[in-house]
Amino acid sequence: MVALKAGSRPPWVGLGAAVWVQFAAGNAYTFPLYSPALKHVLGFNQQQVTMLGVANDIGENMGILPGIACNILPPWIVLLVGVCACFLGYGVVWLAVSETVQSLPYWVNYRFSSKYLIPWQLWIALCIATNSSAWFGTAVLVTNMRNFPLSRGTVAGLLKGYVGLSAAVYTEVYTMALSESASKLLLFLTLGLPLLCLAMMYFVRACTPASGEDSSVHAHFLFTQASSIVLGIYLLTTTILKNTLSLSNVFSYIFIAVMIILLMSPIAIPIKMTLFPANTKKPVPSVGSSDNLVAREGESRQTDPLLVGSFHENEDASDVEMLIAMGEGAVRKRRKPRRGEDFKFRESVIKADFWLLWLVYFLGVGSGVTVLNNLAQIGVSFGINDTTILLSLFSFCNFLGRLGAGAVSEHFVRSKTIPRTIWMTLTQLIMVATFLLYASGAQGTLYAATALLGICFGVQFAIMIPTASELFGLKHFGIIYNFMQIGNPLGALLFSGLLAGYVYDAEAAKQHSSSCSGANCFRLTFLILASVCGLGTILSIVLTIRIRPVYQMLYAGGSFRIPQSSSR
């Protein structure tokens, strides 16, 4: 293990804090929990609630500003902006739903003549509220990717996995601690989440990057991944118990207490490192493996003249300094970047690989989010009245896909230099078969199809993030990653709002009913989505072939190798 310099701090404290911030970053998943109250208290119809749902999706995924801010502001300021957005946005929604402020007749009592008209103040408030998740998520993801530059896939899968689990966490809190009260939930989002992020703000910061080659780093990640899997299984189990058994309040509070303990489990790593510090007196490895960043000959160390950035050209630089340079984008180069090096945003958008990755991600998450947004209606059309377990199953498998994709892709990229995008290819191929299974309407296949789709949907998130950082660098990763994220709301708008909604309403009209039943309700939608994923599979194959040489260069020797000219 590379010895830490005096005064440096390990990144595990920040990773433990990031778990709690990621829980807050999943606040957009709460919309289905309080949207019925919006419809009832404010007198909205379903079309108006749907338009507010669009505001929810747009706010959650508009992260360009947070991406820019991460390069010019410290993480605590980025988190503070998210805290303010969360407090102000959800505060306005809480005032309307709880009818605390009676002087808002336009929001509370006014009845609209058009079924498509919504109060623009509330629409903007929801955009601001859910945009807090973009600020929260970007701050902790970018910071931890830089703190663990040699374990990008693992970190991305872990943090995005916790975001996937947050839906189940919020559901548990809503049903067991808040008595299924939308007003209490919105008050919790208004006050509880900002206080939580304020408490974590100090711990989320840039620090000495961890060496991915140390055995303890691998063990710590295994522990964190195992604890997250235990948490996911626990949440799924308690959700099923809550819906099948009549449990007293005492059991509900016990369930919540155990959930909180499991959420705190990553903090055990820095506690263990404090109580049982590792021996840091090992000598720095000599040059011999391709992953060494600094060559040594005899007792002297020399750096490549291209890696000069914030260091003086003729001065020695330690392994840790090189890791810091990589994590913070501190080194400079004297020519245009090549794939694997640090790109500015305007440099990345003119590259074919950038748009190939964006299209593959857009087609994968766009088709997956269509099912997620309509899963309740899909369950009802298949004859399932209570779709709570179906939703929990999708959420749990989504988490498994995110966590597993990070760990599996990290293993194969190091051992075989296989590009991570190969897993997007395989999962989108599985999604083709899954959508055809949905379209068949075969009895007894709904839960299996939903589980498969949840896993494949999660993989798209966990693979896109490290791939973008490996192709275009970490220096401007925040804005590049958030631009990729735009594929999510755009896919929801095109495939869910326009395609699935139109097909469902047309079939319901044929049945002379306001609701649709039977496999025909979504059959055409599923067939089109299967074609969409087929196109995504082809594009992913093209992308994988194109970037294979990049991965052979970055991971030659079995570990991540920082390019010699990695930033300006």
Image (tube, rainbow, N blue to C red):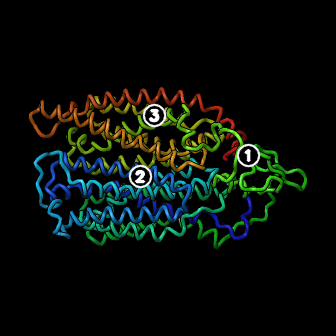
| Image position of 161 (left or right of 413) | left
Asked if 416 appears above or below 159 in the picture, the reply is above
Name the amino acid type tagged 1.
Asp
Element marked by disc 2: helix
Q: Which residue is mark 1?
A: 291
Residue pictured at 40% horizontal, 33% vertical:
431
Of tags 3 and 1, the one toward the viewer is 3
- Comparing marks 2 and 3, which lies closer to the viewer? 3
Disc 2 marks which residue?
164
Side of 124 where 96 appears, left or right: left
- The answer to whether residue 339 is seen in the rendering is yes
User: What kind of residue is marked 3?
Assistant: Leu
The residue furthest right is 298
Quick check: 539 left or right of 492? right
> Vertically, is 293 above or below 383?
below
Q: Quadrant of residue 501?
A: top left
Q: Position of residue 197 (x, y in %)?
A: 44, 67
In the displayed structure image, the side of residue 398 where residue 216 appears, left or right: right
Dot 2 amino acid type:
Gly
In space, the residues marked 3 and 1 are separated at their CA atoms by 32 Å
Pick whichever, 298 or 427, lies toward us: 298
> Is there any visible trace of residue 226 in the rendered image?
no
What residue is shown at x 22% (from left), y 44% (from top)? 384
Report the residue marked by disc 3: 359
Q: Residue at x 41, y 46 (%)?
A: 398
The answer to whether mark 1 and mark 2 are in CB contact below 8 A is no
